[in-house]
Image (spheres, rainbow, N blue to C red):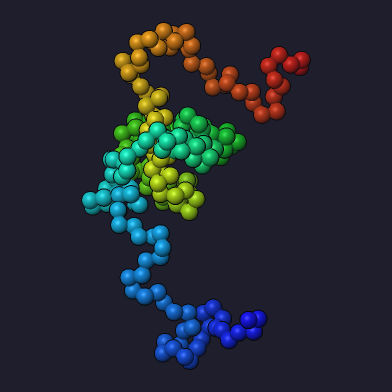
Amino acid sequence: MHDQPRYKPLAATGFFGDGRSARPAIEGTVPRGHLRIDQARYTGKANNNEDVDYFPFQITQADLERGQERFNVFCSPCHSRIGDGNGMVVRRGFRQAASYHTDKLIKAPVGHFFDVMTNGFGAMPSYASRVEPDDRWRIAAYIRVLQFSQNAPLDQVPPEMRPELDKNPETPRAAQAPAPGAAPPGANQ
């Protein structure tokens, strides 16, 4: 077994008529797990290459939780956990990331987010090799949740919870966490 007759990858050979030892794939062959019939599910686009405005599968609570977890891993370093574009990478001096709370992105079809994660956009690289297609849809669903959470109308808040909004005004971002290397609050300077 140690010393077997074999061709080195891409070495020339006289055995095959085309002179190549590496054989091309048979026409129509689809590698296992790569049969992508549902164009919308795997590209985020349909009908004349337009971004889709629907999810290609039903989004459940478990999908949103998975989307949040994947968002926190892959997206929050640049976009922040609330999606305002001020993640840790940006605060360290890198280019400003997009805020999901702009009118343009609130009105964007959900397929746009899938496409950007798949192909990249501007300074953002493609995440197609790192995030599976269904997880990209889950992240897009979670982005919609973030957008709604920051832009929800008051009439969508249950009446019994409205008094809580008045008691807990939004904390300024600077007061949420101390700057890196700063002394904790109340420490002697």
Q: Residue at x 32, y 39 (%)?
A: 58
- Screen quadrant of the N terminus: bottom right
Residue 175 position by quadrant: top right
Q: Is residue 21 left or right of residue 189?
A: left
Compared with residue 42, is residue 23 higher up or lower down, i.e. above or below?
A: below
Q: Residue at x 74, y 16 (%)?
A: 187
Q: Is residue 78 visible?
A: no
**Which of the pair 83/66 is nearer the observer?**
66
Compared with residue 113, is residue 11 higher up or lower down, i.e. above or below?
A: below
| Residue 164: x %, y % from top left | 44, 10
| Residue 50: x %, y % from top left | 27, 48
- Screen quadrant of the C terminus: top right
Residue 144 position by quadrant: top left
**Which of the pair 167/123 is nearer the observer?**
167
* Residue sitting at the far left: 47
| Residue 7: x %, y % from top left | 55, 83
| Residue 46: x %, y % from top left | 26, 50
**Which of the pair 128/174 is nearer the observer?**
128
Q: Residue at x 41, y 90 (%)?
A: 17
* Residue sitting at the far front: 1
